[in-house]
Amino acid sequence: MADTKATLTIGDNTKDYDILSGSVGPQVIDVRKLYANTGMFTYDPGFTSTASCESALTYIDGDEGILLHRGYPIEQLAEQSSFMEVSYLMLNGELPDAATLEKFTHTITRHTMVHEQLSTFYRGFRRDAHPMAILCGVVGALSSFYHDSTDINDPQQRTIASHRLIAKMPTIAAMAYKYSVGQPFVYPRNDLSYTGNFLRMTFGVPAEEYEVDPIIESAMDKIFILHADHEQNASTSTVRLAGSSGANPFACIAAGIACLWGPAHGGANEAALNMLREIGTPDRIPEYIARAKNKDDPFRLMGFGHRVYKNFDPRAKVLSKAASEVLDKLGINDPVLDTARELEQIALSDPYFIDKKLYPNVDFYSGVILSAIGFPTEMFTVLFALARTVGWVAQWNEMISDPAQKIGRPRQLYTGPSQRDYVPVAQR
Ligand code: SDX
């Protein structure tokens, strides 16, 4: 709704633009008529000051370090909820009662199997293929199996496709891991929790029973909750943009996976642990801090900094605490955790990081826990994508049902050659 107006004067052209307010957070200036009124575009590479949509899913306050999912603080959801419950909340807007949660979980559980033909897709990859490459390909291929749920204008089909994506990501992710280590795929089981099922499909083998360790199950479920959604980040914006053309949901999620893979985004968890291992011991931290500050060195502290959080990433705080708890409970003493803590302390007292408001983000500590659980670093971003599928699917559904949404088609500031005539090659 329009509260007040913003007045823009260009030469002798003065126009008012509505200022719209949300329920909480920054207001927006509605510039949808700007081009018609002025013949000009706004210019905002990286969308640092641009709201691309209206959303009721996730709210972030980067200065206060606040992250809410449908109004509930991430700290409370991480400590008290479950990934299945958060999934229901993101899709439906309210926390479910016990019977509704059981029904939802039952539905998701019974979509965890994949078509047997899908397993042949894996055979086409090299065994050493990065699992994110496999995930991109296999998830995109899902649309060739589910023609009955790609009519995006049918809410029923959108719901089935959403459930299928959330349910099958753990199976597909576990299969990618199994393929990379040369072990047989393990089928899902309906008597296990969503996260327990994933752990068994990943680490279980047909030669013996796999007992789900409740400590690991709880830590994994918390990690999934912390990665579920995050407002209009790069991969979510990719899913929305792909969805705005009417592309089927499986193709949209495959596009999101591809974007998440970048080291500036979801790929940072793999890069952060590799960096911490490369640093090795705390005495080498100053060398890397100096490199991070050196403008001529492309090196950045992976797992540090954020477009929105200019104070602290609340997810990093939860993960920092969880890292100590999980490693203690598992009786693991990983020197990488000490290096991470030392690096955080040194960086946060360095004027460069203080002035640029660079703090640990969600990717700084997650790898320490995932490594302790037994995942190779190449699987870290796959786990991020598995969890973020809930957010991508919820955002995709919200976009499709938003009457204000239309195909996304940004413009540009053109700086290329003005019109000129073709010159035949003999005259060049
Ligand atoms: C995720 O958007 C989301 O919500 C993403 C995410 C989600 O849940 O979806 O939270 C998940 O992607 C977390 C971020 C993971 N990426 C990393 O950890 C990679 C390292 N971080 C950076 O690449 C960077 O901080 C970004 C990409 C995260 C944010 O970049 P911005 O907002 O575009 O900021 P910037 O690159 O303009 O940096 C501002 C300044 C620059 O210096 P100046 O040009 O002003 O002199 O800070 C510097 C940067 O050089 N800087 C860093 C740094 N991050 C920024 N310097 C050293 N090390 C870093 N990590």
Image (spheres, rainbow, N blue to C red):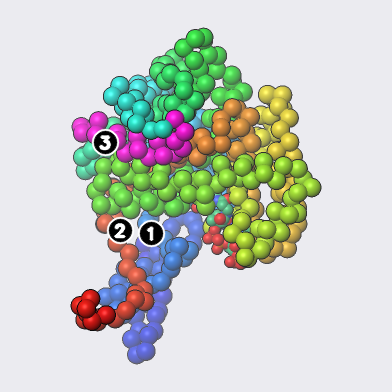
The percent position of residue 282, horizontal first and vertical second, equals 77, 45
Q: Which residue is mark 1?
A: 52
Percent coordinates x, y for residue 107 in the rendering: 35, 24
Would residue 269 be visible to someone looking at this image? Answer: yes
Q: Is residue 142 magenta?
A: yes
Q: Is residue 47 above or below residue 329?
A: below
Which range of residues does the magenta coloring cover?
A: 127-148
**Position of 20 relative to 218 (above/below):** below
Residue labelled 2 has its Cβ within 8 Å of some atom of ligand 1: no
User: What's the residue at 55%, 14% (across, down)?
Assistant: 211
Task: Write down the residue under mark 3.
Answer: 143
Which badge, 1 or 3, comes first in the chain's sequence?
A: 1
* Among numbered discs 3 and 2, the one appearing first in the sequence: 3
Type of the residue with mark 1? Ser
Task: Determine contact: label 1, label 3, CB under 8 Å.
Answer: no
Report x, y in % for residue 222. 56, 33
Of helix, strand and loop, which one carries label 1? loop
For marks 3 and 2, give the CA distance.
Answer: 22 Å
